[in-house]
Amino acid sequence: MTDTVIDVTAETFQTQVMENSMQKLVLLDFWATWCQPCKQLIPVLIKLANESNGDFLLAKVDIDQNKELAEHFQVRSVPTVKFIRNGQIVDEFSGMLSESEITAKLSNHIKRESDELYQQAMEALQQGDNSAIAKMQEICLNDTSNQKISIHFASILAQTQQFEQAKLFIDALPKILQEKDEIKSIAAQIEIAESAKGLPDSASIIKAIEKNPDDLKARHQFSQQLVLQGDVASAMEQLLEIIKRDRKFEDDLGRKELLKLFDIVNTQGEQGAKIVGDYRRKLARILN
């Protein structure tokens, strides 16, 4: 064991976990010798702890040797990891997570140098220093493990319609970060916004659909307009209509565009997940 990784018992819990949590984050890892996922997770946690420069302490608890601790923390399965700060549980997870997923959770609870630098650049941008954008990008790319600031910066670029720069920034991120739902959502918004450049106005598009309900190009354009207006559910309805009328239209464009919208909406909490679930069922009924 190193100073960043310790084994904890009921007798040492107060000093090793509770007191240490007043100074830094403690990851309390409940595991068992017979648990195969535990054997996969522990090396990942140890690696992160050893690379953290003391930012957090990994405290391992063998539940078979410390049943009272497992009961106190209501551990129902292993592995279970509790994040302890100032004597309180501030986060947790059960089962196996990837290294990048654990890193993302840690970034919510550990202050990093890049957080402070990014905040300073943000304040400069708010005061009108446009050169701060380049500084923010540099900070993000110098610490790609700080997923929080990378996601925030990509979002800022998209919101300010700096789509080309946003795309270049996302492409420069590690592949594993590009696969995060939040980044996929931003990338989908950028792609739709880029393809919507030069569209006719909404009134003209609606007239074209009223004149010819089978004008699937107009329906696609209308769906793009609706996304830009923030009405993603109505945009999905237009795409479903395209799929109903001609599944093969422009190489299955309706379904492909619908999947992009799922990426956008999936990041919008429980309500977003419900909308995606509803429209996945609608899509399945059409396809089947």
Image: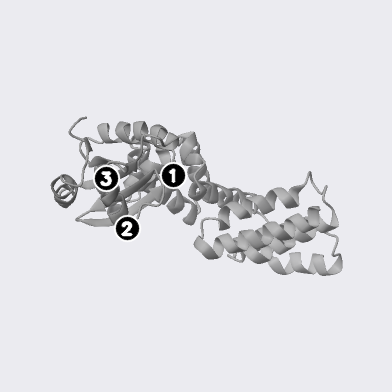
The type of residue carrying mark 3 is Asn
Q: Quadrant of the N terminus?
A: top left
Whole-percent x, y for residue 172 in the image = 46, 35
Q: Residue at (35%, 50%) from the top-left corner?
A: 130
Residue sitting nearer the eye, 64 or 35: 64
Between the residue at mark 1 and the residue at mark 3, the CA separation in whole angstroms equals 19 Å
Q: Residue at (23%, 37%) from the top-left corner?
A: 7
Q: Quadrant of residue 53?
A: top left
- Whichever of labels 1 and 3 marks the residue nearer the N terminus, that label is 3
Q: Which mark is residue 95?
A: 1
Q: Which mark is residue 126?
A: 2
- Check disc 3 and report its element: helix, strand or loop: loop
Q: Which mark is residue 66?
A: 3
Q: Quadrant of residue 32?
A: top left
- Check disc 2 and report its element: helix, strand or loop: helix
Q: Residue at (51%, 56%) from the top-left corner?
A: 267
Between the residue at mark 2 and the residue at mark 1, the CA separation in whole angstroms equals 41 Å
Residue sitting nearer the eye, 160 or 22: 22
- Check disc 1 and report its element: helix, strand or loop: loop
